[in-house]
Amino acid sequence: MKPIRVGLLGIGTVGAGTFNVLKRNQEEIRRRAGRGIEIVMVADLDTARATELTGGQCEVVNDANLVVDNPDIDIVVELIGGYGIAKTLVLKAIANGKHVVTANKALLALHGTEIFRAAQEKGVMVAFEAAVAGGIPIIKALREGLSANRIEWVAGIINGTTNFILSEMRDQGLDFDTVLKEAQRLGYAEADPTFDIEGVDAAHKATLMSAIAFGIPVQFDRAHVEGITKLSATDIRYAEQLGYRIKLLGIARRTAAGIELRVHPTLIPARRLIANVEGAMNAVLVQGDAVGATLYYGKGAGAEPTASAVIADLVDITRLATADPEHRVPHLAFQPDAMSDIPVLPMSEVTTSYYLRVCVADQLGVLADITRVLADATISIDAMLQKEPDEGKDHTDIILLTHQTQEKNVDAAIARIEALPTVQGKVTRIRLEQLA
Ligand code: HSE
């Protein structure tokens, strides 16, 4: 059988990794796929670099339209990123009857519904393993490996840049700004790291996982997104004293009332395996009703780890290209006519536990005032830490861990605590998950 023909849009880090791994392992991959997989055309604005990277082994063009309009190409791999030109090209490739592989989480989290519908109508596949947690085959696991289960929740460290920053802040006791600069120097964080540190990248990925875990449409606009920029080394230290680590988690949880979809810094017990995922590594914990907890760990970014996911999609498409569309794995794991309209809950309706740090005057009755406010709001306290005031200071920190409650109860209690005359400044609130 003649090789399947692939066109690459963009040959940056991941594109070059894909080209190299496909070439290096071509025989092994051909034995798996049943036929060869060949990159025959590459589009990149830097044609000189693209020609050098591909060693003259395929046609290089600077106009991506020449790839998506080429009738000889079966699969288009989109590695441009963003949701501008990438969206236009992906939709055009689909309209031209080509299968698409993409690592573009932002595109699918925002425009997935439109893209998957177009692909469905055209009978082509859109594969996106590389869009979530890089080299970890989490899409495959959720969509196929765990298909017997009613998935209850997914919680992941799905942004390597922020995990590196949090690990360094804890290990070195450094503040956020210092570690961010180090992350940029080492090349982990982008020159503009906004999407990483503000939680947006993780929210794109959590949105995709929520869709395939629960069979709901991709709804990035309903996700609660909170990054790590306000996290202080002080809270990381207090959390540690209480037996917890702080991680930026992407969480998708099914509840009776709806789906929780949220990204925020989270205290998790230090003894959990996932709490010990350090540096730029990623990990995703999935709770299914039959299988229980399963944990997936690996590199969430980088040339060859991400290429590993891109090529796995190429192999899948190669195997299924001749199958009837209805015999393929649905894009979002559930059949398109069997999607659920269960709502994504607003953050105020989310149920979780909390770490609260309150800066108080060192006076009689302060603690009683705070605990009374919490009791009035039906918030039960799980643990508490009170620090001695520093030498010469008349105020100190009280740290409270609560049992589970709804976010709106905590919002109300925090407003009342901040209004107490003995309380100084804002209450620091960090959510806490046992992940048991
Ligand atoms: N910037 C991401 C991270 C990798 O730091 O994990 C690509 O999604």
Image (spheres, rainbow, N blue to C red):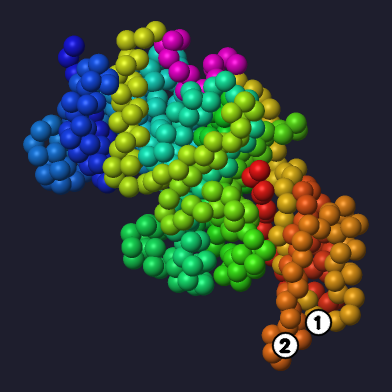
Q: Position of residue 279 (x, y in %)?
A: 43, 57
Please indicate, yes or no, whether residue 265 appears anywhere in the rendered image.
no
Residue at 17% across, 14% down:
2
Between 347 and 87, the one nearer to me in the picture: 347
User: Residue beneath label 2, please?
Assistant: 393
**At which x and y percent is residue 163?**
48, 56
Closer to us: 159 or 190: 159
- In contact (CB < 8 Å): disc 2 and disc 1: yes
Q: In the image, what residue occupies the spot 52% across and 66% down?
A: 170
Which amino acid, by three-letter code, is at mark 2? Lys
**148 to the left or right of 116:** right
> x and y percent of residue 156 in the render?
53, 44
Look at the picture and state if 197 lies above or below 105: below
Q: In the rendered image, which residue does mark 1 sit on?
A: 362
Quadrant of the image for the N terminus? top left
- Secondary structure category for the residue under label 2: loop
Looking at the rendering, which quadrant does residue 267 occupy?
A: bottom right
Q: In this rendered view, identify the residue nearer to me: 51 or 274.
A: 274
Q: Looking at the rendering, which quadrant does residue 120 occupy? A: top left
Q: Look at the image and tell me whether residue 381 can be seen.
A: yes
Q: Amino acid at mark 1?
A: Asp
Which quadrant would the C terminus be assigned to in this image? top right
The tag on residue 24 is none
Task: Quadrant for residue 76, please give it.
Answer: top left
Q: Tell which of 85 and 225 is nearer to you.
A: 225
Q: Specify start and end residues of the magenta stretch as a single range.
A: 325-338
* Label 1 packing within 10 angstroms: few (<14), some (14-19), many (20+): some
Residue at the image position 64 percent from the left and 61 percent from the top = 243
Residue 16: percent from the left, percent from the top?
Answer: 22, 42
